[in-house]
Image (tube, grey):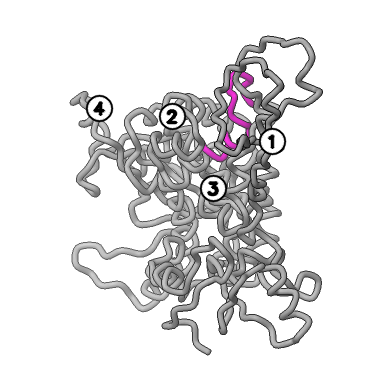
């Protein structure tokens, strides 16, 4: 049965996953593999549907776990409710988040007959008797032996981080959730939390895992502070303070995620697209821009104005290994700066050694800077004074374009973090250099962009 146009929905109580929502998501353009849609690309599908098995014992276990009073004739369960994201030999039945893990129903209040001859001491809670000399008694209001001791006055205090339940536990249930909110798989997220936990500020009552998730959600989805405050049940000022603190902490302790790879490592992981014609390539470079919220200061506007974007932007240089690992990302410069100026002043040239080869676009007019260091520049051929390209130049340019596709894909991975693909709020502009480093490190946590066999 085809699910593409059906009204298939998950049978689990409270789950809103259905085929219509999935089709809308699949028809969206994939940011990483544009212009292909998510249906056409190789990205992990948000969820899948699995039908009630025909085996009698398996059907019985499914229906028992689902705890449905009136199960539908055609029953589907989405992958969110399976331990392995689908029925497997080890975990064939749905067991996760089945919609009935809630407090038990309250017991009915009991009747207690009052002896009219016994005079009771007046209490602060008024009790209204019925005509039949009976009254309703709430068991929760009954006095117990443990309440007969001396009364101790207690003052209210803010719950400690260890006692509060992290929002992250309910929000990140799968790799799809983690990629959506943080840009990295779930295992990598928990590894990152464990590495950063010793450096967490001690002044916040928010659990450390929530503080880190809050910061990554700001980078990944660029949620406004008020939205994050509601999601994490805290104040907007606390969110702003937490995000600012963790950007500083992450940029300091994730520097090693952007390594300049040794030449031997680059050669060992060289993809097939580079092996034949560009086997000595050390890195592929490109510049990218991110739009800024318009500043009130006219000088700042002038320095950051980009004619290409017709807006105020920051511009930065990215150097990527042939296998797709980000090896270098510069600080942010004003949008009007040239590629040559950024290359010269960012410190990128200091990483190059004699014999290296750098692949770039036509805009990188840095051949003289590289020749001083005995480094070769590979750029596409271009015409001069109306002359046409030769057949060899056309072929060479096509091969360079084919190889440079990977740097564009790596930059698209970087722009998955919407703080870089959307408008940067004015209050985060002073931290844009640190944000660039953090996002580049998180992209590298996802591993190589292409394998050496491709």
The residue that label 2 is drawn on is 431
Of the residues tagged 3 and 2, which is closer to the observer? 3
The residue that label 3 is drawn on is 182
Residue 67 makes an appearance in the image: yes
What is the distance, in whole Å, between disc 4 and disc 2 at their CAs?
Answer: 16 Å
Q: Which residues are magenta?
A: 200-214
Give the x, y percent position of residue 42.
Answer: 53, 71
Q: Does 437 sit left or right of 118 as displayed?
A: left
Q: Is residue 212 magenta?
A: yes
The residue that label 4 is drawn on is 300
Q: N-terminal of the two: label 3 or label 1? A: 1
What is the distance, in whole Å, between disc 3 and disc 2 at their CAs?
Answer: 19 Å
Whether pointer 4 and pointer 3 mark residues with C-beta atoms closer than 8 Å, the reply is no
Q: Residues within 10 Å of mark 1 (few under 14, many from 20)?
A: few
Give the x, y percent position of residue 371.
Answer: 47, 46
Element carrying mark 2: helix
């Amino acid at each position: 049965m085809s699910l593409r146009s059906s009204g298939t929905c998950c049978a689990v109580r409270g789950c809103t996953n259905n085929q219509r929502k999935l089709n809308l998501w699949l028809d969206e353009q994939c940011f990483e593999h544009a212009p292909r849609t998510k249906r056409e690309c190789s990205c992990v599908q948000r969820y899948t549907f699995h039908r009630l098995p025909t085996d009698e014992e398996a059907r019985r276990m499914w229906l028992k776990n689902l705890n449905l009073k009136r199960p539908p004739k055609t029953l589907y369960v989405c992958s969110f409710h399976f331990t392995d994201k689908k029925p497997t030999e080890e975990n064939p039945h749905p067991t996760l988040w089945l919609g009935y893990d809630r407090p038990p129903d309250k017991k009915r209040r009991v009747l207690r007959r009052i002896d009219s001859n016994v005079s009771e001491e007046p209490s602060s809670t008024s009790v209204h008797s019925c005509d039949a000399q009976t009254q309703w008694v709430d068991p929760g209001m009954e006095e117990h032996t443990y309440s007969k001791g001396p009364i101790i006055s207690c003052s209210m205090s803010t719950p400690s981080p260890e006692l509060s339940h992290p929002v992250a536990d309910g929000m990140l249930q799968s790799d799809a959730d983690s990629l959506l909110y943080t840009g990295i798989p779930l295992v990598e997220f928990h590894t990152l939390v464990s590495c950063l936990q010793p450096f967490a500020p001690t002044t916040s009552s928010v659990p450390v895992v929530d503080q880190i998730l809050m910061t990554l959600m700001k980078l990944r989805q660029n949620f406004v502070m008020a939205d994050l405050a509601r999601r994490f049940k805290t104040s907007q000022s606390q969110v702003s303070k937490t995000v600012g603190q963790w950007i500083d902490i992450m940029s300091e302790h994730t520097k090693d995620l952007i390594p300049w790879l040794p030449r031997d490592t680059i050669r060992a992981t060289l993809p097939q697209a580079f092996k034949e014609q560009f086997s000595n390539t050390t890195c592929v470079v490109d510049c990218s821009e991110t739009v800024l919220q318009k500043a009130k200061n006219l000088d700042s506007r002038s320095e950051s104005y980009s004619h290409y974007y017709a807006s105020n932007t920051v511009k930065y240089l990215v150097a990527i290994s042939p296998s797709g690992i980000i090896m270098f990302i510069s600080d942010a410069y004003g949008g009007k700066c040239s590629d040559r100026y950024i290359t010269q002043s960012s410190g990128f040239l200091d990483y190059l050694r004699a014999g290296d080869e750098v692949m770039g676009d036509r805009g990188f007019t840095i051949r003289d800077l590289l020749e001083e260091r005995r480094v070769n520049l590979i750029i596409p051929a271009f015409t001069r004074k109306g002359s046409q390209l030769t057949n060899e130049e056309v072929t060479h340019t096509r091969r360079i374009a084919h190889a440079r596709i990977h740097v564009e894909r790596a930059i698209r991975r970087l722009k998955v973090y919407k703080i870089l693909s959307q408008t940067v709020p004015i209050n985060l502009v002073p931290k844009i250099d640190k944000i660039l480093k953090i996002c580049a490190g998180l992209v590298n946590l996802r591993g190589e962009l292409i394998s050496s066999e491709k």
